[in-house]
Image (cartoon, rainbow, N blue to C red):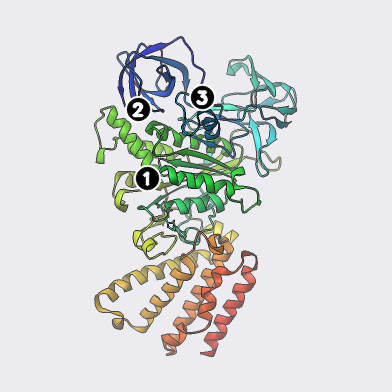
Amino acid sequence: MNSSESHVGRVVRIAGPVVRATGLEHVRLYDVVRVGELGLVGEVIHLSDGVTTIQVYEDTSGIRVGEPVHSTGQPLVAQLGPGLLGQVYDGLQRPLESLAKMGGEFIQRGVSASPLPEDFGWEFTPCVSVGDHVNAGDVLGVVSESRTIEHRIMVHPHMCGHVEIIRSGEFNVHETVAVIRLDEEAKGGYIEVTLAQSWPVRQPRPCLSRLAPREPLVTGTRIIDAFFPVAKGGSAIIPGGFGTGKTVTEHSLARWADADVVVYVGCGERGNEMTDVLEEFPKLEDPRTGAPLMERTVLIANTSNMPVAAREASIYTGITIAEYYRDMGYDVLMLADSTSRWGEALREISGRLEEMPGEEGFPAYLGARLAEFYERAGRVICLGSPINPNAHKRIGSVSVVGAVSPPGGDFSEPVTQNSMRVASTFWALDYDLSRRRHFPAINWTNSYSLYDFHDWFERNVAPDWDDLSREAMALLQREVELLEIVKLVGTDALAEPERAVLAIARILREDFLQQSAFGADRYCSIHKAYWMLKTIMDFYRRAQFAMESKVPLERITSLPVVSDIARMKEIEVENVEMEIKTIMDRVQYSFGEL
Ligand code: ADP
């Protein structure tokens, strides 16, 4: 953000993060300004009758009326280029490590720090030659950013022309790697291209077209993959009261979900929770490559003790970085923990602006803002030519998972309700389940997924996947109804087949749905989930059949193979098919014996 001296205004009013100034005639909505002698970063959010309203991203205490305000003439932008991965940023994309070096324990106000490492030399290998015509999004060359991610240096989305100069070798992010002679219709002239580009965070990055969600984002969490899958390029929300497992679930997703790049936005959570993330993530290993997980992760940390306005911005900074990697052709997962704190930031700023409050004091535009955010998720055909010459298009995706922390776990509050309207998958965390230590505490009666991946599962897992999942869910629903009856009249009132439903549903809950995020069972491949579910449902079918021949339920539930089923979780992913088939044979044999 370069500051220009041309438009200097004066502060006339200060209300927490909201500052009003006069004398900024040429400023535009969403331009970034520097407020006061300290040069605090702010953004213009309202313009009227010569008065400019600014939301300031830093603590405004000590600022006085009459201090100067400088316009930068630019919106809030993210710097995009190699070196993003592995970084920990604040909501304005300032690397926390550099800020810590400058200011010790506390972040100094008004400081700038380059988001990308400035003096690191990246080995750039060009993919185009002098004279080639390049369009928006075309890959000019590549840089190996980490062991797993090839960073593709793309033509800016608003640019097309002929390559005049293209270099190879080692460059930092400010050095010119190519010169492009712009097409006449793109105003002509020459543009020097570096390894980095910038993009206004509040604007979605363009793509060629959007694709329907066809494929699930496999997460390794059984209840999600089997019953409430989220699409690659889809959106999901995890609402839950305090301690129900939002953070643990998001961490599991960051670690195990089938994504190339993860952007984690810690938004307004307490400082100590974010410290856990910052301490834990660098120690984690990427299960796919064995490299540190941070090599494919970008963290944005904005804790509750940081200014609220920066929290509002952090979500946009995060999704812009996610879209940038999507444009290279990667599957990106963006996690936001928690969108409620983001909603609260909107509420606070709106209050300072003295806007008419909507439901529970949130501004009337809360729903629109949430929708704008979730709509930036998607699976797209990217701008530019395909990476792989054999493919005819480049496809990338951004999947968004937002945690919601409704006060008292009450899902009828505005942030949960507005998020439900736009996200297609809903994982409802449940106090009761977490109190009983049933983890993940995703309630299977309230949760839903609007996606249909029937074809994908049939092609990639097994033709009977959908049937198994539907039958298992029906069994769990039946259990809920029966438990209601039991509550009223006791178990004795149930017939034997109904008691069988309770017995098998319990096996499903304990041996399939429950999955600790900490033990060896924390990741379950989709094939393992399939074989586990198949075994349990096979057991159920055989039990029903046996009972028709008057075998008592007690004899069925005390079969030794029941404990083999309980141990399926522990089977190593590599040996799944063989070991579980052995258990299925044992099931068949046991019922034969009966
Ligand atoms: P929240 O973010 O909703 O406040 P956390 O994610 O911090 O809650 O979870 C609270 C506690 O619940 C964790 O410390 C952990 O002990 C337990 N927990 C949550 N999810 C799981 C899980 N999948 N497996 C095992 N324990 C879990």
The correct choice, above or below, for 147 with respect to 549 in the image is: above
- What's the distance in space between the residues labelled 3 and 1, CA to CA? 34 Å
**Residue at 44% in and 69% down:** 509
- According to the image, label 3 marks what residue? 112
Q: Which residue lies furthest to the front in this view?
A: 104
Q: What residue type is labelled 3?
A: Ser
Secondary structure of residue under mark 3: loop
Task: Indicate the secondary structure of the residue bearing disc 1.
Answer: helix
Residue at x 43%, y 15% (from the top left corner): 70
Q: Front-most of 334 and 395?
A: 334
Residue 305 appears at what percent x and percent y? 39, 37
- Looking at the image, can residue 463 be seen? no
Whether pointer 1 and pointer 2 mark residues with C-beta atoms closer than 8 Å, the reply is no
* Alpha carbon separation for disc pair 2 and 3: 19 Å
Q: Mark 1 Cα within 10 Å, few/some/many (few <14, many 20+)?
A: many
The residue closer to the viewer here, 144 or 96, is 96
Tell me the CA gap for discs 1 and 2.
26 Å
In this rendering, the label closer to the viewer, 1 or 2 = 2
| Residue at image coords 61%, 50% | 286
- Going from N to C along the chain, the mark reached first, 3 or 1, is 3
Instruction: Provide the residue designation for mark 1.
Output: 419
Up the image or down, 426 lies above or below 37; here it is below
Q: What residue type is labelled 2?
A: Pro
Circle 3 Cα neighbour tier, 10 Å, few/some/many (<14 / 14–19 / ≥20)? some
Residue at image mark 2? 17
